[in-house]
Amino acid sequence: MMHKKDVEKYIAKAIKAAREHLSISGDPKSVNAEYDGYAASLGASIVTSGLKPALAFYSDLGVREGVARHKVLQAIAQILQEEALFSGLGSEADALLDFVLKPENEAKQRQLKAKILAASIALKLALRNFTQVNKTGQS
């Protein structure tokens, strides 16, 4: 079960992660508007499809119109790296998926899911502090 305290604890980390992974090059206060949509739909994807399928979908390294879904997972991985539960989590594009798929983490799936959901909510809230720029460059 996801806890409100986790979301609150992750907000500052989410703002920093959004600046580092999602901001538009040269403008740390702006993000592509599509990242907001990706962050918003990640939680729903996890709830409806399951943790592993959702992370597999978001781990896609393809870039669509200058936006890469996997960067959302990189931001979430950064948010969670200091958690004891995520000890050893890397920052590569597929690090979160690889971590969840490890056999030794199978028994912790519920805890991992709750923390990842909390981090995704914190990221969605953090993105409200950035100027959303659409594909045409308009805010």
Image (cartoon, grey):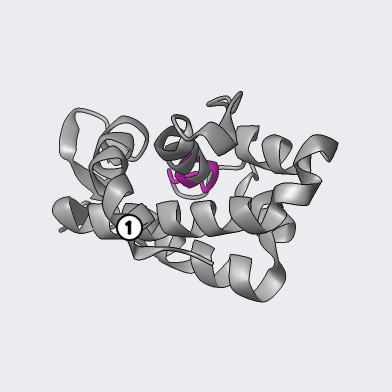
Say if 22 sits above or below 58 in the image.
above
Residue at 44% of width from left, 46% of height from top?
67
Q: On the picture, is 26 further left or further right than 41?
A: left
Residue at 31% of width from left, 44% of height from top?
14
Point out residue 109 in the picture as x, y percentages from the top left corner.
70, 53
Residue at 61% of width from left, 65% of height from top?
46
Towards the viewer: 58 or 32: 58
| Quadrant in the rendering for residue 79 | top left
Say if 100 sits above or below 57 in the image.
above
Residue at 48% of width from left, 64% of height from top?
2
Under mark 1, the amino acid is Lys
Towards the viewer: 18 or 87: 87
Residue 136 seen in the current view:
no
- Per the rendered image, the range of residues in magenta is 66-72
| Quadrant in the rendering for residue 110 | bottom right
Extreme residue in the right direction:
103
Say if 123 sits above or below 19 in the image.
below
Point out residue 88 in the picture as x, y percentages from the top left corner.
61, 23
Q: On the picture, is 109 further left or further right than 22?
A: right
Point out residue 102 in the picture as x, y percentages from the top left corner.
79, 36
Point out residue 12 in the picture as x, y percentages from the top left corner.
23, 42
Q: Is residue 68 magenta?
A: yes
Residue 4 seen in the current view:
yes
Q: Does the magenta stretch include residue 50?
A: no
Q: On the picture, is 71 further left or further right than 93?
A: left
Near mark 1 (Cα within 10 A), the count class, few <14, some 14-19 or many ≥20, is: few
Q: On the picture, is 28 further left or further right than 22?
A: left
Determine which residue is flagged by label 1: 5
Q: Quadrant of the N terminus?
A: bottom right
- Count every numbered label the image shows and give the total: 1
